[in-house]
Amino acid sequence: KQLGDALLVRVGQRFVLTPRAEALREPLHALLAQLAALVRPQPTFDPATATGVVRMIATDYIGALVMPPLLERLRLAAPNLDLHLLPPTPRFFAEIAEGGADLGFVVRLQAEAGVRARKLFSDRFVCVVRTDHPAVQGGLDLATFLSLPHILVAPLGAPGGFVDTALAELGHGRRRIALTIPHFFLAPALIAASDLLITMPERIARTLTVDRPLRILPVPIKVAPFDVSLAWHDRVHHDPANAWLRDQVRLAMREL
């Protein structure tokens, strides 16, 4: 009915093809073969022979923790697979959804349609000052904390953060942000050469203060710990390559 032709016509005890059906025979075989290829199960991902670039969104803080163990795993299992680290942007979830990035590391996880996430590790905040800072020789109390000029690391350039939220909720007023920078790795040299104070995640603070004249102190207010999660989109959830890479990130981070 759709083709306007009988296609099969009875001739005695059998059916024969009409000229229209004969004309469809070869292209139909080709189309069915293509359809079979489309619905065939995906081949198993082989990291040993995989090539190409994987794009991941990460701050310098997360990259410094994740990349060393992950690169070692990829060196052994997928030596021809390259990584491209992208800086975070306000369009983090859109980049994940639209294919601008294959994976992303996120601290402020939010409900987003089609985005999945897996917790990797937790961290908490500490304060860092230079070792001979005159105002904190006896420790760091809240009054001193509020009186000192602060550095704020704002990867997206936006003001505020976990500490400012905690101060506001506790009614302790505001701290003075004397300097805003985009990366944690800028902080050690700036802190060592000034009376500035920075509040940063403990894991990166432990790394950045090694062999430097810097001192780690507890934050004098209660600031809740936070989780770092790996995020990806539904569109790659069943992709063998993406699933394998997600598992490598998880295994690389299990010691944390």
Image (tube, rainbow, N blue to C red):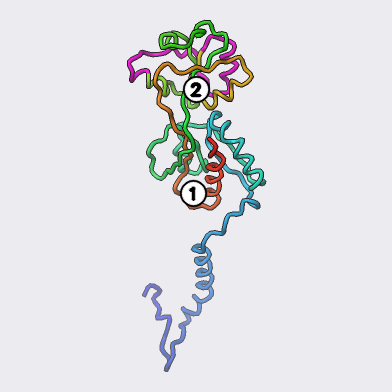
The amino acid type, in three-letter code, at marker 1 is Val
Kindly identify the residue that appears in the image at 58 percent across and 54 percent down: 45
Kindly identify the residue that appears in the image at 39 percent across and 21 percent down: 222
Range shown magenta: 167-196
In-front residue for pair 250/107:
250
Asked if the magenta segment contains residue 102, the reply would be no
Residue 213: name its quadrant: top right
> Residue lying farthest bottom?
12
How far apart are the two marked residues, 1 and 2, measured between alpha carbons?
A: 33 Å
Q: Where does the image place residue 158, in percent across and percent down from the top left?
A: 44, 23
Kindly identify the residue that appears in the image at 42 percent across and 35 percent down: 109
In what element is the residue under mark 1? helix
Q: Where does the image place residue 4, in percent across and percent down from the top left?
A: 39, 76
What residue did someone put label 2 on? Answer: 200
In-front residue for pair 137/144:
137
In primary-sequence order, the first of circles 1 and 2 is 2
